[in-house]
Image (tube, helix red, strand yellow):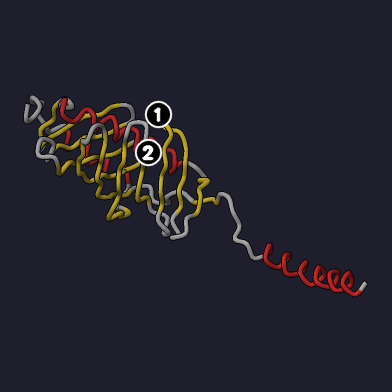
Amino acid sequence: MRRLMHLRNALIFCVPAVIFLQGCEAPQGDSQVQPLPAESYEADCTLEYGEGQSAALHLTRYGESLWDAAFTDPPALAGVILTFDGNAVSASYKGLAFTVPKTALPAKNMLTIVTETLDAAHAAESLPCSPQEDGSQICRGESAGGSYTLTFDPSGQPVLFEVPSQPLKITFSGFTELQETAESTVTETSANTTETTTVTEPNA
Protein backbone atom coordinates (compact mmCIF):
# COMPACT_ATOMS: atom_id res chain seq x y z
CA MET A 1 0.00 0.00 0.00
CA ARG A 2 2.77 2.41 0.92
CA ARG A 3 4.56 1.53 -2.33
CA LEU A 4 1.43 2.41 -4.38
CA MET A 5 1.02 5.76 -2.58
CA HIS A 6 4.69 6.57 -3.18
CA LEU A 7 4.31 5.80 -6.90
CA ARG A 8 1.18 7.98 -7.13
CA ASN A 9 2.96 10.90 -5.49
CA ALA A 10 5.89 10.51 -7.86
CA LEU A 11 3.60 10.62 -10.88
CA ILE A 12 1.81 13.74 -9.59
CA PHE A 13 5.19 15.44 -9.15
CA CYS A 14 6.39 14.49 -12.65
CA VAL A 15 3.32 15.63 -14.62
CA PRO A 16 3.80 19.39 -14.02
CA ALA A 17 7.47 19.00 -14.95
CA VAL A 18 6.53 17.41 -18.29
CA ILE A 19 3.99 20.18 -19.01
CA PHE A 20 6.61 22.82 -18.21
CA LEU A 21 9.17 21.27 -20.56
CA GLN A 22 6.64 21.06 -23.37
CA GLY A 23 5.78 24.71 -22.91
CA CYS A 24 9.45 25.71 -23.29
CA GLU A 25 9.99 23.99 -26.64
CA ALA A 26 10.89 26.38 -29.49
CA PRO A 27 8.02 26.86 -31.95
CA GLN A 28 8.50 24.98 -35.22
CA GLY A 29 7.28 25.73 -38.75
CA ASP A 30 7.41 28.56 -41.23
CA SER A 31 7.55 32.28 -40.58
CA GLN A 32 6.57 35.22 -42.78
CA VAL A 33 9.31 37.42 -44.21
CA GLN A 34 8.60 40.86 -45.62
CA PRO A 35 9.90 41.19 -49.19
CA LEU A 36 12.54 43.73 -50.09
CA PRO A 37 11.17 47.24 -49.47
CA ALA A 38 13.50 48.88 -52.01
CA GLU A 39 12.23 49.29 -55.56
CA SER A 40 15.79 49.69 -56.84
CA TYR A 41 18.94 48.04 -55.54
CA GLU A 42 22.30 46.61 -56.60
CA ALA A 43 24.63 43.85 -55.50
CA ASP A 44 27.80 42.04 -56.48
CA CYS A 45 27.10 38.47 -57.52
CA THR A 46 28.96 35.23 -58.10
CA LEU A 47 27.16 32.97 -60.54
CA GLU A 48 27.82 29.21 -60.65
CA TYR A 49 25.93 27.18 -63.25
CA GLY A 50 26.05 24.34 -65.72
CA GLU A 51 29.06 22.05 -65.78
CA GLY A 52 31.58 24.02 -63.75
CA GLN A 53 30.83 27.39 -65.35
CA SER A 54 31.05 30.56 -63.26
CA ALA A 55 30.85 34.33 -63.66
CA ALA A 56 31.19 37.46 -61.56
CA LEU A 57 28.92 40.41 -62.18
CA HIS A 58 27.27 43.50 -60.73
CA LEU A 59 23.48 43.13 -60.74
CA THR A 60 21.23 46.21 -60.63
CA ARG A 61 17.44 46.34 -60.33
CA TYR A 62 15.85 49.59 -61.51
CA GLY A 63 12.23 48.47 -61.19
CA GLU A 64 9.89 45.63 -62.11
CA SER A 65 11.46 43.57 -64.93
CA LEU A 66 14.20 46.20 -65.40
CA TRP A 67 17.71 44.90 -64.68
CA ASP A 68 21.34 45.33 -65.69
CA ALA A 69 23.99 42.63 -65.30
CA ALA A 70 27.54 43.97 -65.77
CA PHE A 71 30.09 41.14 -66.03
CA THR A 72 33.59 41.39 -64.58
CA ASP A 73 34.59 37.73 -65.09
CA PRO A 74 35.34 35.47 -66.97
CA PRO A 75 37.59 37.42 -69.37
CA ALA A 76 35.38 36.47 -72.34
CA LEU A 77 32.46 38.33 -70.72
CA ALA A 78 34.27 41.08 -68.80
CA GLY A 79 32.78 44.46 -69.75
CA VAL A 80 29.63 42.98 -71.28
CA ILE A 81 26.36 44.40 -69.90
CA LEU A 82 23.12 42.48 -70.32
CA THR A 83 19.98 44.62 -70.00
CA PHE A 84 16.71 42.91 -69.08
CA ASP A 85 13.64 44.93 -70.05
CA GLY A 86 10.51 42.86 -69.70
CA ASN A 87 10.80 39.93 -72.11
CA ALA A 88 13.62 41.58 -74.10
CA VAL A 89 17.33 41.12 -73.38
CA SER A 90 19.98 43.26 -75.07
CA ALA A 91 23.75 43.50 -74.72
CA SER A 92 26.36 46.23 -74.87
CA TYR A 93 30.13 46.49 -74.58
CA LYS A 94 31.89 49.79 -73.91
CA GLY A 95 28.86 51.70 -75.14
CA LEU A 96 28.40 49.64 -78.29
CA ALA A 97 25.22 47.60 -78.67
CA PHE A 98 25.17 44.10 -80.14
CA THR A 99 23.21 40.89 -80.03
CA VAL A 100 23.71 38.73 -76.96
CA PRO A 101 26.94 36.75 -77.64
CA LYS A 102 26.84 32.99 -77.62
CA THR A 103 29.29 32.93 -74.74
CA ALA A 104 26.76 34.85 -72.62
CA LEU A 105 23.64 32.84 -73.50
CA PRO A 106 23.93 30.25 -70.68
CA ALA A 107 24.52 33.00 -68.10
CA LYS A 108 21.66 35.05 -69.60
CA ASN A 109 19.27 32.11 -69.21
CA MET A 110 20.30 31.63 -65.57
CA LEU A 111 19.98 35.36 -64.81
CA THR A 112 16.48 35.34 -66.30
CA ILE A 113 15.47 32.78 -63.68
CA VAL A 114 17.05 34.87 -60.91
CA THR A 115 15.53 38.21 -61.93
CA GLU A 116 12.05 36.76 -62.46
CA THR A 117 12.14 35.11 -59.04
CA LEU A 118 13.33 38.29 -57.29
CA ASP A 119 10.65 40.32 -59.11
CA ALA A 120 8.01 37.88 -57.85
CA ALA A 121 9.43 38.08 -54.31
CA HIS A 122 9.31 41.89 -54.45
CA ALA A 123 5.66 41.84 -55.58
CA ALA A 124 4.56 39.49 -52.78
CA GLU A 125 3.10 40.90 -49.57
CA SER A 126 5.09 38.36 -47.56
CA LEU A 127 7.12 35.23 -48.14
CA PRO A 128 6.75 31.96 -46.16
CA CYS A 129 10.23 31.04 -44.98
CA SER A 130 11.89 28.63 -42.57
CA PRO A 131 13.93 30.33 -39.82
CA GLN A 132 17.47 29.06 -39.25
CA GLU A 133 19.55 28.99 -36.08
CA ASP A 134 21.82 31.78 -37.34
CA GLY A 135 18.84 34.12 -37.86
CA SER A 136 18.66 33.69 -41.63
CA GLN A 137 15.49 32.68 -43.46
CA ILE A 138 15.16 30.15 -46.28
CA CYS A 139 12.24 30.47 -48.72
CA ARG A 140 11.30 27.70 -51.14
CA GLY A 141 9.25 27.90 -54.29
CA GLU A 142 8.95 27.10 -57.98
CA SER A 143 10.62 29.05 -60.78
CA ALA A 144 10.72 28.66 -64.54
CA GLY A 145 13.92 26.66 -64.04
CA GLY A 146 12.60 24.38 -61.28
CA SER A 147 12.35 24.31 -57.50
CA TYR A 148 14.46 26.95 -55.80
CA THR A 149 15.65 28.12 -52.39
CA LEU A 150 16.15 31.82 -51.66
CA THR A 151 18.07 32.63 -48.49
CA PHE A 152 17.77 35.98 -46.67
CA ASP A 153 20.19 37.12 -43.98
CA PRO A 154 18.85 38.32 -40.58
CA SER A 155 18.46 41.86 -41.98
CA GLY A 156 16.21 40.64 -44.82
CA GLN A 157 18.70 40.95 -47.67
CA PRO A 158 19.07 38.10 -50.20
CA VAL A 159 22.39 36.27 -49.89
CA LEU A 160 21.91 33.03 -51.80
CA PHE A 161 19.68 31.71 -54.60
CA GLU A 162 19.83 28.08 -55.72
CA VAL A 163 18.07 25.94 -58.33
CA PRO A 164 19.58 22.45 -57.93
CA SER A 165 17.99 21.02 -61.09
CA GLN A 166 19.86 23.41 -63.41
CA PRO A 167 22.27 23.48 -61.50
CA LEU A 168 22.36 27.16 -60.54
CA LYS A 169 23.80 28.98 -57.55
CA ILE A 170 24.13 32.74 -57.19
CA THR A 171 25.67 34.43 -54.15
CA PHE A 172 24.89 38.08 -53.35
CA SER A 173 27.16 40.52 -51.50
CA GLY A 174 27.40 44.28 -51.03
CA PHE A 175 23.63 44.70 -51.27
CA THR A 176 22.78 48.42 -51.56
CA GLU A 177 19.50 50.28 -52.06
CA LEU A 178 19.53 52.85 -54.86
CA GLN A 179 18.32 56.37 -54.12
CA GLU A 180 17.71 57.24 -57.75
CA THR A 181 14.18 56.49 -58.94
CA ALA A 182 13.60 53.78 -61.48
CA GLU A 183 11.91 56.21 -63.89
CA SER A 184 14.85 58.61 -64.12
CA THR A 185 17.31 55.74 -64.42
CA VAL A 186 15.38 54.09 -67.25
CA THR A 187 15.08 57.45 -69.05
CA GLU A 188 18.82 57.99 -68.79
CA THR A 189 19.54 54.44 -69.96
CA SER A 190 17.23 54.85 -72.96
CA ALA A 191 18.92 58.12 -73.89
CA ASN A 192 22.32 56.47 -73.80
CA THR A 193 21.11 53.50 -75.81
CA THR A 194 20.06 55.74 -78.72
CA GLU A 195 23.68 56.82 -79.08
CA THR A 196 25.08 53.30 -79.37
CA THR A 197 26.04 51.54 -82.60
CA THR A 198 25.27 47.93 -83.40
CA VAL A 199 28.42 45.84 -83.83
CA THR A 200 29.34 42.18 -83.86
CA GLU A 201 29.83 40.38 -80.59
CA PRO A 202 33.17 40.78 -78.79
CA ASN A 203 35.59 37.91 -78.37
CA ALA A 204 33.91 36.04 -81.20
Q: Give the residue at x 17% y 34%.
A: 193
Does the CB distance between marks 1 and 2 fall below 8 Å? no
Q: Amino acid at mark 1?
A: Ala
Is 99 situated above or below 167? Answer: above
Give the quadrant of residue 148. top left
Q: Position of residue 111 (x, y in %)?
A: 29, 35
Q: Position of residue 127 (x, y in %)?
A: 50, 45
Name the outermost residue toward the right: 1
Is 58 situated above or below 194? Answer: below
| Mark number, residue 144 | 1
Q: Position of residue 187 (x, y in %)?
A: 25, 39
Please identify, in this view, whether the residue under mark 1 or under mark 2 is nearer the observer: 1
Give the quadrant of residue 167. top left
Q: Quadrant of the N terminus?
A: bottom right
Q: Quadrant of the C terminus?
A: top left
Does 118 sit left or right of 140 as displayed? left
Does 51 sit left or right of 139 as displayed? left
Q: From the image, tell me which residue sits under label 2.
A: 64
Q: Give the residue at x 64% y 65%.
A: 24
Q: Residues within 10 Å of mark 2 (few under 14, many from 20)?
A: some
